Amino acid sequence: MANPLNNFFTKYPFLKFLSNRYVIVLVFFIIWMLFLDNTSYLLHQDLNKQIDELEANKKYYQDEIKKDNKNIKKLQNPDHVEQYAREKYYMKRDSEDIYIIEYEEDELRKKDSIADLQ
C-alpha cells in the first residue's frame, strides 16, 4: 500500500515543497507570530492605532493649553477682564442696558448642532 501523502504529491506536483519540514516549520512560525503570540502583528496594529489617537489628543490638549495661557496673560490686564466679562457673561455697569441680538442663522446652527448630538 502506497503512502497517501506521496499519492497526493504525485497528483499535485506543485505542492511538493510542502513536504519539506523547513517549510512546515516556517509556515507554523509565521502563523504563530501573526495571530497567536502575545506580541502578534494584529495586537501591534491595535496598539499603533491607540498611539496615534493618543498623540492626536496630546497635540489637541497642547494647543488648548497654549490658548488658555494666552487668555490668562490677557486677563492680567483689568481692561481685558472687563471686556471678557461683558462679552462672555453679559455683565454690565449699573448705568447701562444690554441688548442681545441673535440672528436667525445662529439659531439654525444651534438647532443643527443639537440635532447632530442626538
Image (tube, rainbow, N blue to C red):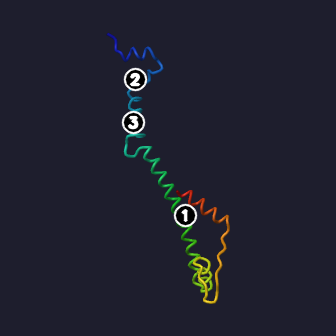
Mark 1 surroundings within 10 Å by alpha-carbon count, few (fewer than 14), some (14 through 19), many (20 or more): few
Q: How far apart are marks 1 and 3 (CA)?
A: 41 Å
Residue depicted at 39% across the width and 29% down the height: 24
> Residue 83 appears at what percent x and percent y?
62, 81
Residue depicted at 38% across the width and 40% down the height: 36
Q: How far apart are marks 1 and 2 (CA)?
A: 55 Å
> Residue 41 appears at what percent x and percent y?
44, 43
Q: Mark 3 points at which residue?
A: 29
Circle on res. 82: none
Q: In this view, which residue lies farthest toward the top?
A: 1
- Dot 2: element: helix
Task: Out of 67 and 8, give the one closest to the viewer.
Answer: 67
Evaluate if marks 3 and 2 touch, with contact meaning CB atoms under 8 Å apart.
no
- Dot 1: element: helix
Q: Mark 2 points at which residue?
A: 19
Q: Name the residue under label 1.
A: 60
The amino acid type found where label 1 is placed reads Tyr
Query: Which quarter of the figure has residue 100?
Result: bottom right
